[in-house]
Image (cartoon, helix red, strand yellow):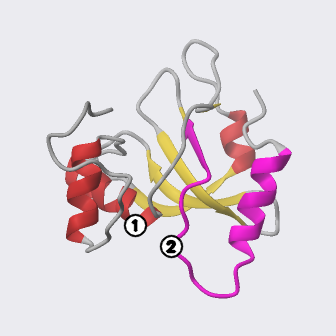
Amino acid sequence: MILIPDDIRERLLANGAAERETDHVPVVKLFDPTGAATWLITEMMPDGDSLFGLCDLGFGCPELGYVSLAELERVKGPLGLGIERDIHFEARLPLSVYAEAARIAGRITESERVLAQAAAALRIRNPEIPPEGAGPTRR
C-alpha cells in the first residue's frame, strides 16, 4: 500500500507550507496493523520525508512531533506487515482536539465522547460532535 498517495501528499505539503502556524485537521491516519502504533498526520515538510502530527507508539504517551516517511515505509512487523493507511479515516476536528483527547485517553482515540470532552476543555465548539450520550461511539 502506498502510505501517502499524490492527492494526500499535496494536501500535506500545502499544510506544511502555511505561512502562519495553523491548527490543521489531520489529513491521514497511519497505523501498525499488528500493534498499537498510530499517527495522525497534518503536514509534510518540503523535504518530502518529514511528517508532522500526533504520534502514538502505543506506550501510553502520545505526543506531537515529526516522523520520517521513509522510516515508516521500512517498518515490518512480526507478521511481515508494514504500516498501513486507514482509508476510512475522516478527521473533523483540529489536531489540538485529537492531541487533548489522546492526553485524556492515554492513546489516540476516535471516541466521540472523549473528543467532545477534549473539545470542551479547549473551548472548541464543533456541531459535528454529537452531544454526550447521543449516538454510538467509535473507539
Where residue 51 appears, as percent x and y from the top left, is 66, 59
Residue at figure coordinates x 80%, y 42% from the top left: 5
Spatial CA span between label 1 and label 2 = 7 Å
Mark 1–mark 2 CB contact (< 8 Å): yes
The relative height of residue 116 versus residue 107 in the rendered view (above or below) is below
Q: Which is nearer the eye, 86 or 45?
A: 86
Looking at numbered disc 1 in the image, what kind of residue is underneath it? Ser
The residue that label 2 is drawn on is 23
Secondary structure type for disc 2: loop
Q: Which region shows up in magenta?
A: 6-30
Residue 96 is tagged as 1
Left or right of 108 on screen, residue 27: right
> Magenta segment: does it hold 21?
yes
Residue at figure coordinates x 36%, y 41% from the top left: 110
> Magenta segment: does it hold 108?
no
Displayed quadrant of residue 72:
top right
